[in-house]
Amino acid sequence: MPPGHSVPEADSDLDYMARAIRLAELGRYTTDPNPRVGCLLVREGEVVGEGWHRRAGEPHAERLALAAAGARARGATAYVTLEPCCHQGRTPPCTEALIEAGVARVVCAMVDPNPLVAGKGLDALRAAGIETLLGVSRAEASALNPGFIKRMEQGRPYVRCKLAASLDGRTALASGESKWISSEASRSDVQRLRAGSSAILTGIGTVLADDPGLDVRLSASELPGMTPNDPIRRPLRVVVDSHWRMPPEARMLALPGRTLVVGAESRPEPMAALQAAGAETLRLPARAGRVDLVALLEELARREINEVLLEAGPRLAGAALSDGLVDEIILYQAPCLMGQGARGLFELPAITAMSDRVALEILEVRRIGPDLRIRARPDPGRIG
Ligand code: AOF
Ligand code: ZN
């Protein structure tokens, strides 16, 4: 153990960190593009202050907890779900506030992947004589911010692919009709998924077939951590439309929130018509005549998009999965059968050997109303 590190990961450290993680979760629907962070200050077994980061531009979790504790912060232990920042961003460094308040020990779950911090926050605390402990409940804390972490570390957002299917894995009739496979309960769950996402990504095929709104129809009082008058964050809608077929009359363009239409060729006329309808248009490099999805995700990360919800048909979903761009699948399975002729979830190349099948790891299975909700992640290592 290097000097300045405390050794024991006592039960109480785990318990207090669990509380800090619950606080951080309250920011699920508001902190974007900042990470969700919670902080607890404990002195002699008593919680003397707590805080959670609510919104970019507003105070960080540590500063709120320190403000709540006042003079009782002196000698206290701070439990923080992310390494305290040491840089001047929209707000001043948390390390300085912790040092000034006389906090004796800082326990944090993980290093801040932001290169402006990345270990330097902990260094600053140790240099000021504060004892530090890193790594308590790291996995749980990482799960709060998969998108922020992936964007900082890899320059790409975290992609969740949302799908609805029958029990026999079919998603639409041969005619393309796909509305309302899943129940009301699953649809409101999707609303919460959207509300926590930075962007919703779909393909032109879905727009032409369903004319979806891709909006959040919840009010603040329906989302944990939000107060009734809080403005709802509206995820950016992104339509992959390689050949500019998007109609300017598309329903989503008339709804509140921004829409970005991304094509693979330069076609001034349809682009201008979409701009006149309120959309932003962007041309990205093509791969085999289609928008290069890697280039798209990198562009979204540059725009501080942390979490992308992919709500697309089998073609775009299949392309994203084949390219290894899907981090997580969320599948709502309805208790019905759709039979022969109905379409599957992902258009993937036909495989000839079982060893070529796409392996998944199931992360979670839940019942939502009459449906099943399965969370899984592609697990390329498992088969082959
Ligand atoms: C913390 N506590 O609660 C959060 C942190 O522009 P700013 O000032 O809000 O800084 C944003 C960066 O600060 C963000 O990218 C991340 O590195 C860190 N977030 N740090 O100590 C917090 N939300
Ligand atoms: Zn900070």
Image (tube, rainbow, N blue to C red):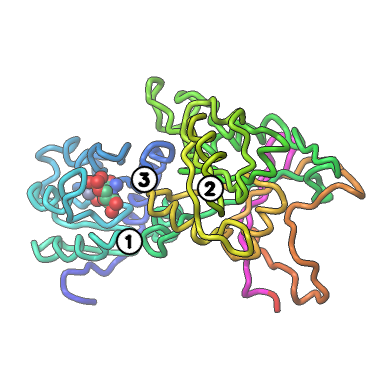
Rendered image quadrant of residue 214: top right
Membership of 65 in magenta stretch = no
Relative to 78, does residue 279 appear above or below in the rendering?
A: above
Q: What whole-number distance in Å separates the C-alpha atoms at marks 1 and 3? A: 14 Å
Check residue 46 in the rendering and tell me which mark sits there, or answer none: none
Relative to 56, does residue 128 appear above or below in the rendering?
A: below
Q: Quadrant of the C terminus?
A: bottom right
Rendered image quadrant of residue 151: bottom left
Q: Is residue 320 left or right of residue 298?
A: right
Label 1 residue near ligand 1, CB within 8 Å: yes
Q: Position of residue 87 (x, y in %)?
A: 17, 54
Give the labeled residue for mark 3: 33
Q: Position of residue 355 (x, y in %)?
A: 76, 77
Residue for point 72% across, 43% down = 164
Count of labels in the image: 3
Q: Is the magenta region chiefly helix, strand or loop?
A: strand
Q: Is residue 48 visible?
A: no
Camera-near label (1 vs 3) is 3
Tag 3: Cα neighbours inside 10 Å, few (<14), some, or many (≥20)? some
